[in-house]
Image: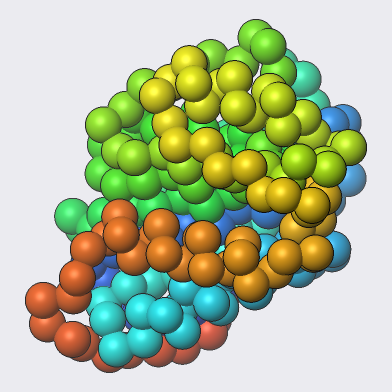
């Protein structure tokens, strides 16, 4: 168990009284207990966080980009899951009753799918998720969207399609793209933004409150 570092959340959009929280989860490694940093995996999800924040500007929506404690999934330890759990608890504490949408890439997509049946979760969007055959099938009421580039050689688009079919999720194949989602960035951005907005619904009040600060947990 790694105790020398903490998960953190970079915050965009509304800071107080949000009616919805979009939690963005970056990728990682199969095995690593090295401290997670704001490296390429984290940075790849930054445009999605900023894009959703821009698309919901003027709405009471908070957008959070989580950074895990460590880089790896690490087998049975499943190290990202306690970090996601903490972020969900923090979202509920700071924004009681808010709808929560999870958007994850690769390892982050795998983690997001584990919380599909979590109370308050209004949607799951998994981008090029890393999935294994023995991953549990989590069925919830919230819509689930899984998208995968058909030229991905890091994670398996066929596994994503099969998982989506087994849980009744929507599967979107992205022609010509690879794991980093760089060949069709506008398509990915519009897919994520559109899904998030659909899940949280229209803003009844049109309230505004934007910032870009970090939240650091008081515990590991």
Q: How many marks?
A: 0
Q: Farthest residue in the left direction?
A: 204
Across and down, in percent, residue 135 comes to 61, 16
Would you place residue 159 above or below residue 109 in this image? above
When asked about the image quadrant of residue 197, the answer is bottom left
Residue at 76 percent of width and 41 percent of height: 150
When asked about the image quadrant of residue 90, the answer is bottom left
Q: Is residue 107 left or right of residue 147?
A: right
When asked about the image quadrant of residue 15, the answer is bottom left
Q: Farthest residue in the top direction?
A: 134
Residue at 84 percent of width and 31 percent of height: 30
**Quadrant assignment for the N terminus:** top right
Across and down, in percent, residue 48 comes to 59, 69
Residue at 53 percent of width and 84 percent of height: 212
Across and down, in percent, residue 73 comes to 75, 32
Q: Is residue 80 visible?
A: no
Would you place residue 98 above or below residue 15 in this image? above
Across and down, in percent, residue 63 comes to 45, 69
Q: Is residue 72 left or right of residue 159?
A: right
- Which is nearer the eye, 207 or 77? 207
Q: Is residue 101 visible?
A: yes
How was the colour assigned to the protein in this rendering? rainbow
Would you place residue 209 above or below residue 146 in this image? below
- Which is nearer the eye, 181 or 1? 181
Q: Is residue 196 left or right of residue 114?
A: left
Residue at 52 percent of width and 37 percent of height: 171
Q: Is residue 62 left or right of residue 32?
A: left
């Amino acid at each position: 168990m790694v105790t020398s570092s903490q998960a953190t959340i970079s915050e965009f959009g509304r800071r107080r009284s949000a009616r919805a929280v979009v939690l963005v989860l970056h990728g990682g490694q199969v095995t690593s207990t090295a401290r997670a940093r704001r490296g390429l995996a984290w940075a790849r999800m930054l445009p999605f966080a900023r894009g959703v924040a821009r698309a919901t500007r003027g709405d009471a929506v908070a957008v959070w980009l989580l950074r895990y404690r460590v880089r790896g999934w690490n087998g049975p330890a499943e190290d990202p899951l306690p970090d996601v759990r903490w972020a969900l608890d923090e979202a509920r504490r700071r924004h009681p009753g808010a709808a929560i949408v999870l958007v994850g890439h690769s390892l982050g997509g795998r983690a997001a799918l584990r919380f599909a049946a979590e109370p308050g979760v209004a949607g799951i969007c998994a981008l090029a998720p890393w999935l294994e055959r023995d991953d549990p099938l989590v069925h919830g009421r919230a819509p689930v969207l899984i998208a995968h580039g058909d030229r991905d050689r890091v994670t398996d688009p066929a596994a994503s399609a099969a998982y989506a079919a087994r849980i009744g999720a929507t599967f979107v194949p992205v022609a010509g793209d690879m794991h980093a989602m760089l060949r069709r960035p506008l398509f990915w951005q519009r897919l994520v933004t559109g899904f998030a907005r659909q899940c949280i619904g229209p803003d009844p009040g049109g309230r505004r409150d934007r910032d870009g600060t970090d939240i650091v947990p008081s515990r590991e």
